[in-house]
Amino acid sequence: MKYLLYVFYIEIALTLVSGVQAFFTPAAFIAQFSDTPAPTLASEMARWYAVLLFVIAYLLYRALRTRGTVLTIVLQALLIGDVIHIVAAVVTANALGRWPLVVIASIVISIVLGVIRVICLWRPQQVGIERAA
């Protein structure tokens, strides 16, 4: 089970890819959700969202390197974020009147990461978050 934490490095990579796209090509980032061209303000808000993605990726990376209580707190926060992300995805799909692939994929990824986070928080010694006493 010690290899389970390595999934979060994949999460970091995905978060960084999303952040780069949202920051440097926000119109393309938004186009994943809808064929309707996004107004300038929406593109600029995507850039602001990218800033948060970079911060989240960095925090998770540092927490993985530190382990212990720091990683536990970060995983708890990200688990809350997973639940809220799923709710937001459903709200987005309802607002769009359809389920774009990116929304479905984000729900699947959030569920998978959420389950892994629960396992890690439930068994911190077995996954290597905490050292055995």
Image (tube, rainbow, N blue to C red):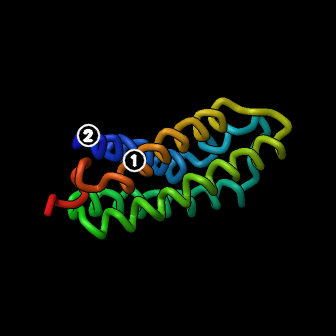
- Residue 29 is labelled as none
Residue 64 figure quarter: bottom left
Q: Which residue in the protein does label 1 denote?
A: 119
Q: Residue visible at 59% across and 49% down?
A: 26
Residue 44: give x, y in percent of width and height.
63, 60
Amino acid bearing label 2 = Met
Q: Quadrant of the C terminus?
A: bottom left
* 84 horizontally vs 52: left or right: right
**Which residue is found at the position 22% from the left and 43% from the top?**
2
**Extreme-top residue of the structure:** 101
Q: Dot 1 surroundings within 10 Å: few (below 14), some, or many (20 or more)?
A: some
Dot 2 corresponds to which residue? 1
Front in this rendered view, residue 56 or 22: 56
Instruction: Name which of mark 1 and mark 2 comes first in the sequence.
Output: 2
Point out residue 77 in the picture as x, y percentages from the top left corner.
47, 64
Question: Residue 104 sits in which quadrant?
Answer: top right
SS at badge 2: loop
Q: Are marks 1 and 2 in contact (CB under 8 Å)?
A: yes
